[in-house]
Image (cartoon, rainbow, N blue to C red):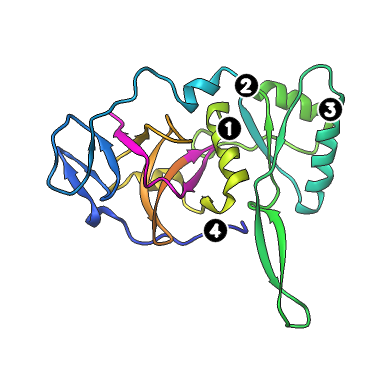
Amino acid sequence: MTQDCSLTPSIADENGSYGDLCFPKGIQVAGTGEEPDSGIEVVSRRIGGNEGNVKGNANKGKPWGYILIHNKKIESFKKQMDAYNLACTGERHECFIHYSYKYKQKSNGRGVIKKQMPTISGLVFLQGTTIDLQQFLRKNYPQYHLINNCSTGKPACIDNGIMQPFMEAVRSHPENVTFLRDPFVKFAKDHTKLRVLTGLFKGLEGYIVRVDRDRQLVMEFGGYAVAIRGIHNEDFEAVE
């Protein structure tokens, strides 16, 4: 991975209590309308229905899987996929690669070189059902296989309603998205799972964790744990 971070100790000692639950200070959590003493702002305004990015987009596109390719072959593969989708009259498989900037010192030792690189070496996302992607790869790229979700042991399948806001965040503010080394399940300890009620990630669930000295939303993403910055002004509710 070229974009990574180290985790600071648990934020459990910073949490304020609300009933039998604990929430990070400064995070707005929907409740019953009673103001707790911890300084957490209770959000009485509730989001009606099941609208949101997850529900709204889930039926508008097929899910996503991912493969791993040698870094030197990624650009060639991306061009081939773009050409395939442009000429395709049948099943298209959109291709997405998460890039971030890597800084390397020049060979003469004077200054640095800024180069755009895949955030996770060789990670390529493809849109389509697991069966469709397996058939496509078997026919066109037999050397590649869908990567399994480590928690299920089956090919990772990312809902389009999760993938779309993720891609939008990466395109607009790539520095706000960080892939973490630790598995998602590790973040459940001492943290309450929350659902986002507002903003780009409305409807998604995760934990508020202090990462790189900043409180971020850590969510599961096809077996990876991904941290999202810039969520301080959003509203949340506890996931029952």
Give the residue displayed 58% in from the left and 32% down from the top: 164
Residue extent of the magenta highlight? 220-240
Lower sequence index among marks 2 and 1: 2
Q: Which residue is mark 1?
A: 164
Give the residue displayed 36% in from the left and 51% down from the top: 209
Lower sequence index among marks 2 and 4: 4
Give the residue displayed 84% in from the left and 27% down from the top: 86
Give the residue displayed 46% in from the left and 50% down from the top: 229
The disc labelled 1 sits on which kind of residue? Gln
Mark carried by residue 4: 4
The percent position of residue 199, horizontal first and vertical second, equals: 44, 35
Q: Is residue 202 visible?
A: yes
The disc labelled 2 sits on which kind of residue? Gly
The percent position of residue 59, horizontal first and vertical second, equals: 56, 17
Q: Which residue is mark 2?
A: 61
The percent position of residue 77, horizontal first and vertical second, equals: 81, 41
Look at the picture and state if 232 lies above or below 84.
below
Q: Quadrant of the C terminus?
A: top left
Tell me how far mark 2 sits from mark 3, CA to CA.
18 Å
Of 154 and 198, the residue lying toward us = 198
Secondary structure of the residue carrying tag 1 is helix
The disc labelled 4 sits on which kind of residue? Asp
Lower sequence index among marks 1 and 4: 4
Q: Residues within 10 Å of mark 1 (few under 14, many from 20)?
A: some
Lower sequence index among marks 2 and 3: 2
The disc labelled 3 sits on which kind of residue? Leu
Q: Are marks 2 and 1 in contact (CB under 8 Å)?
A: yes
Mark 2 vs mark 4, foreground winner is 2
Lower sequence index among marks 3 and 1: 3
Look at the picture and state if 230 lies above or below 93.
below
